Amino acid sequence: MSKIEKEKETEKKKSQEENNSLHESNLSFTSKDFYFEAYSHIGSHEDIIRDSTFLNSFKRAILNNPQIFKDKIVMDVGCGIGILSLMAAKAGAKKVIGIDHSKILLQTNEIIKENGFSDTITLINSKVEDVEKLPEGIEEVDVIISDWMGYSLFYEHMLESVIFARDKWLKEGGMMIPDQASLYICGALDPELNENRINFWDNVYGFQMKSIKPLIPKEPLIAYVSSDYIVSDPGLLKKINLVTIDRQDIEFETNFEFEFSKQNYFNTFVLYFTYGFNYVKSPFNISTSPYYPMTHWKQTILYLDEMYPVFPNEIIKGTFKHIQDKKRPKDLIKRANKGYSNSTDLDHVRSSNFHDLITKNNNNNNNNNKNNKNNNNNNNNHNHNNNNNNNNNNNNNNNNNRGGNGNEL
């Protein structure tokens, strides 16, 4: 082959690479596959893209911190339609490797070409755990970004993949974005529970379905919770550091306690989480608490069997267990779409032993109450920090609570 022919062949290969940034993938499917698989994923990704609180948090962490990304190699775990990969490329990354098992990557590849980043962003259509080699001989990355958080923080089962990628490819001293997250629990009153969720089954178009009613309190619900319904301070369930967490830390059992802040009634637990960026120029946290703008994660509601009166300074103690069902991930996905959360042990909220979990505010436990107030003060300080860090978020998103374009952070 002559020198000219070799040059033409080289240019041809380069052109092919520019037109297809998918690396070593077998991404082919029929029109039927496209309809059923890509349609559902586009819908779920649209919910995320329209969540201005979420998107602006990563925009702030990435685009406002080019010193982290300039000339660096970045891995985007669970890249989806590539919005975080695009941000990293725009922030100056030398190479971005987006990994996702979904066939949505066919559209992601087109999006990358639309924005002129085919030379910078390479997509791998695979589970992270199945990737043996990175493209272009890359052996380690400088930064890992991922929007791994799910309902009640852990639902998406992506955290394990992020940890796997970190342990295999993140260089020593590399950066995780976000780098920390915390899960909280608090008490709330759902005043319409009996009417809308339970008594509904007494007469369903003329048919009795009362046998369904005992199941309602056993099913966690994913929904928006008004801050007006919160009747307690928050209790911390789990705090994780993305730089140090191990896979076995994802399953846990922990004791919790929180103090009621007002005289009211109590018939639900509410779970929400925060995630944060501590290594950017101006560290900040984002909260999915009912006191902050709504996000696509909403909150997770755990129902009690009965409604209980509560009073200020009254303390509740309990045990929370988080278990991920690795045997039936598809079932979990279907259940989530119907309003289920990830597997959570709810034995501690059954009416049969509920009263054993409440510590009354009397002379015998004044010391305990003082200790709990100190703990709650720490939680409050944490929340105040979130409030300060998220002031801009709140102001920018008041008119976009259900997701929208919002203003730039």
Image (cartoon, rainbow, N blue to C red):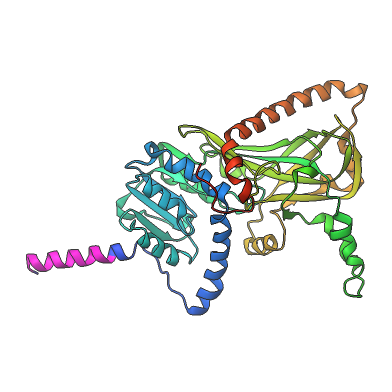
What residue appears at the point 83 percent right and 25 percent down from the top-left corner?
369
Residue 383 lies, in percent from the top left, at 66, 33
Residue 123 visible in the snapshot: yes
Q: Is residue 139 left or right of residue 359?
A: left
Quadrant position of the N terminus in the picture: bottom left
Residue 40 lies, in percent from the top left, at 57, 68
Q: Is residue 362 left or right of residue 236?
A: right
What residue appears at the point 78 percent right and 25 percent down from the top-left corner?
373
Compared to 336, does 370 lie above or below?
above
Front residue of 404/285: it is 404
Residue at the bottom extreme of this rendering = 31
Q: Is residue 236 left or right of residue 119?
A: right
Residue 363 lies, in percent from the top left, at 92, 21
What residue appears at the point 66 percent right and 56 percent down from the top-left corner?
325
User: Is residue 6 magenta-colored?
Assistant: yes
| Figure label count | 0
Q: Is residue 235 left or right of residue 112?
A: right
Residue 154 lies, in percent from the top left, at 63, 49
User: Is residue 125 magenta-colored?
Assistant: no
Front residue of 312/248: it is 312
Compared to 280, does 290 lie above or below?
below
Span of residues in magenta: 2-16
